[in-house]
Structure formats: C-alpha cells, structure tokens
Amino acid sequence: MLSRLRGAMTRLWTPLADALLRRGVSPDAVTITGTLVVVVTALWAFPTGHLLLGGLLIAVFTLTDSIDGVMARRSGRSGPWGAFLDSTLDRFGDGAIFAGLVLWYTGGGDSRLTAVLALACLVLGSIVPYARARAEGLGMTAAVGIAERADRLFAVLLATVLVGAGLPDVVMTVVLGLLTVASAITVVQRMATVRRQVREATP
C-alpha cells in the first residue's frame, strides 16, 4: 500500500528534485538527511510520549523518501551505490522507530507486552531483509512474504498516529502483534523458498 502511494507521489517530487539538483544538492545528501530526521525524531518523540507528532513527521519523511531516487535518475547518477546506501540507511530508520516504541512502553507507556512485541518487530525487521539479501548473494531469490518493509512501516506508523491521537494502547499492541506474526511468517517463507531452490539445483 505504502509502495503504491510512494510511486504515485514520485511525479509530485520531480519539480522539487530538479530544484535541489540546481542548487547543487546531491541525492546522497538527501538520503542521509532524511534518515537522520527519522532516527532523531523516533528516538526523541516516541520515548517522550509524543506519538502523534513523531508518527506524522516520520510518515512525511517516509513518503518523501523517493526524492533521492528521482534526483539520481534525473541527474544520471542512479547506480549500485545509491541503492546500497538507501537500503542500508533504511535499516537505521526502521530500527529507530521500533526502538523508540520499546523505550516508550518500557517507560512512560508502561506496557511490558507492547514493549516485547515492539522488540520482536525490531529483531524480525532486520532478519526479513537479511534473508533476501543473503539468498541473492548466493545466486538465488527470496522476494516473497506477506510483510514487506513498506507494509510494516505503514501499519506501525498508522497505529502510532492513532494511539497518539487518543485511541487506547491496545491498538498498538494488536498491530505490533500482527506485525510480529507476519514478519515471522515472511522469514519462514523466504527460508522455504531458498530451500526449494537448493533442492531443485541439487542433482
């Protein structure tokens, strides 16, 4: 869902991308700046209970995440380095979001269950992309699963904004629980996909 929305927004970012390029701003600078804003916001706003503000700010920067890609394509700088940098820094942003929630629910949020689920999402959120990357490094594919990064981000940010706007914390608990299950299933799906390819390749 979030991927489709970001795709539709790409056309809107083209004028801004062109303006930044004219001012000498590089796509890498935009990538790094966006990540820093997400990390700082998540690790400040969430642990201090500013869920609504933090969720909205991170959602905005998540939607503008495609600006660096537009800039790279329009300036002819699109390549492996940009893709590597973007994917690597995404892990920092994702980790900060769930870490911020862990800190809040072990502190002022006072919900051990929600904190544990946020921690599970943090851990599984690093395993899901690793499984795919490792498979591709071995010459196989593992682009399967019911919990892609964009879907996980959309769900957790929506829950954060809703809870911050006044809905009960159980909304966050349920969403994090569903994300934990979905992420675990995705890991199993990717492992099964790689296992099947290995068996097919074995004489």
Image: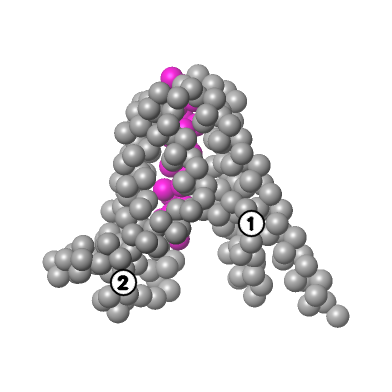
Going 32% across and 47% down the picture, which residue do you hit? 60
* Label 2 or label 1, whichever comes before in sequence order: 2
Residue 136, relative to residue 182: is it above or below?
A: below
Asked whether 201 falls inside the magenta stretch, the response is no
Residue at the extreme right of the image, as rendered = 203
Residue 201 % position (x, y): 78, 77
Which residue is found at the position 56% from the left and 48% from the top? 125
- Residue at 47 percent across and 35 percent down: it is 159
Q: Dot 1: within a 10 Å radius of its alpha carbon, few (fewer than 14), some, or many (20 or more) residues?
A: some
Toward the viewer: 64 or 8?
Answer: 8
Question: Callout 2: helix, strand or loop?
Answer: helix
At 37% across and 51% down in the image, what residue appears? 62
Instruction: State which mark lies toward you, 2 or 1.
Output: 1
Which span of residues is magenta-colored? 87-108
Position of 98 with respect to 15 (left or right) is: right
In the rendered structure, find residue 145 and report the number of the disc placed on it: 1
Res 72 label: 2
Q: Is residue 89 part of the magenta span, yes or no?
A: yes
Q: Secondary structure at mark 1?
A: loop
Which amino acid lies under the numbered mark 1 shown in the image of this protein? Gly
Image position of 8 (left or right of 119): left
Q: CA distance from mark 2 to mark 1?
A: 29 Å
Instruction: Answer left or right for 144 relative to 24.
Output: right
Taking depth in this image into account, of 10 and 131 the one nearest to the observer is 10
The image quarter containing residue 42 is top left
**Mark 2, other Cα within 10 Å: few <14 / some 14–19 / many ≥20:** some
Q: Which mark is residue 61?
A: none
Rendered image quadrant of residue 4: bottom left
Q: Examine the residues drawn in magenta and state their main secondary structure.
A: helix
Task: Return the residue found at the far left.
Answer: 23
Mark 2 belongs to which amino acid?
Ala
Return the x and y of residue 173 as percentages of the image width and height. 56, 29
